[in-house]
Image (spheres, rainbow, N blue to C red):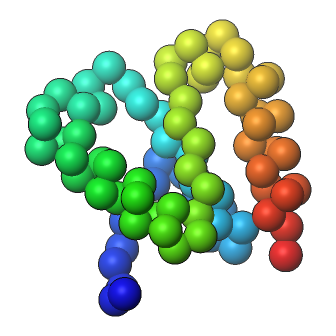
Amino acid sequence: MGERWHRLDTGWRDRRVGAEYDGGIAHLTQDQLRADRDRHNWLTENGWTLLHFTDVDVYRRHTRMVATVRRLLDRNAA
């Protein structure tokens, strides 16, 4: 399938879990949206679990957000 490199907002390579912050300007154009979906699909196809969080998650529901990440990290433990 070839080697590709993608940047994530944060991730745990050893567990193949990534977390993305989807801000208000994350997908302003169709090109940005297409590129993001291509990256997401490629990572998923290669065994990654990707989580997406918004401003509400980060600023108002951070406890729930951290718990979600923790569950996935525990589930994907080596």
Q: 72 or 23: nearer the eye? A: 72
Q: Is residue 21 above or below residue 23?
A: below
The N terminus sits in image quarter: bottom left
Q: Is residue 25 above or below residue 72?
A: above
- Where's residue 76, x and y in %? 80, 64
Q: Residue at x 71, y 22 (%)?
A: 62
Q: 50 or 20: nearer the eye? A: 50
In the rendered view, does 75 fall on the left or right side of 13? right
Q: Residue at x 56, y 13 (%)?
A: 56
Q: Quadrant of residue 6?
A: bottom left
Q: Is residue 9 above or below residue 56?
A: below
In the rendered view, does 78 fall on the left or right side of 49? right
The C terminus sits in image quarter: bottom right
Task: Specify whether residue 60 is in view.
Answer: yes
Q: Quadrant of residue 24?
A: top left
Q: Residue furthest bottom?
A: 2
